[in-house]
Image (tube, rainbow, N blue to C red):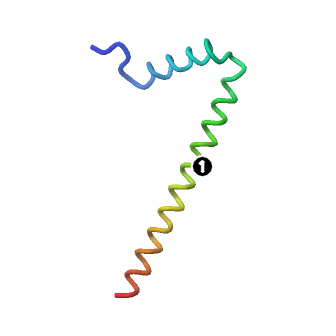
Amino acid sequence: MALIGNMWDWAIVIIVALILFGGANKIPEMFRSFGKAAGEFKRGQMEIQKELEKEVHITAEKK
């Protein structure tokens, strides 16, 4: 049996570590930065998907 097995256990450990080492004032700033990074990642994925679809469409037209 694992001591830390599921996602919620990890989330609690991370939050406690943030409070201990970063202070309670830094937590909103960290999560805001994480949210911005996640948004940029999703936008990048969407751009790549659009370009791939465009290339597939162009390739299909050439045949």
- Please report the residue visible at 64 percent of the width from the left and 42 percent of the height from the top: 36
Q: Where is residue 32 in the image (x, y as percent from the top left)?
A: 66, 35
**Is the residue 34 above or below the residue 9 in the image?**
below
In this rendering, is residue 40 above or below 4?
A: below
Quadrant containing the N terminus in the rendered view = top left
Residue at 47% in and 74% down: 54
Describe the element under mark 1 as helix, strand or loop. Answer: helix
Q: How many discs mark residues in the rendered view?
A: 1
Rendering coords of residue 52 (x, y %): 44, 68
Residue 5 point in image, percent of width and height: 35, 20
Q: Residue at the left extreme?
A: 1
Name which residue type carries label 1.
Glu
Give the crowd class for mark 1: few <14, some 14-19, many >=20 residues within 10 Å.
few
Indicate left or right for 60 with 14 as reference. Answer: left
Label 1 belongs to which residue?
40
Q: Quadrant of residue 23?
A: top right
Q: Residue at x 60, y 18 (%)?
A: 18
Residue that extends furthest to the right in the rendered view of this protein: 25
Q: In which quarter of the image is the C terminus?
A: bottom left
- Which corner quadrant of the image does residue 34 belong to? top right
Q: Judge whether 37 appears above or below 4 on screen.
A: below
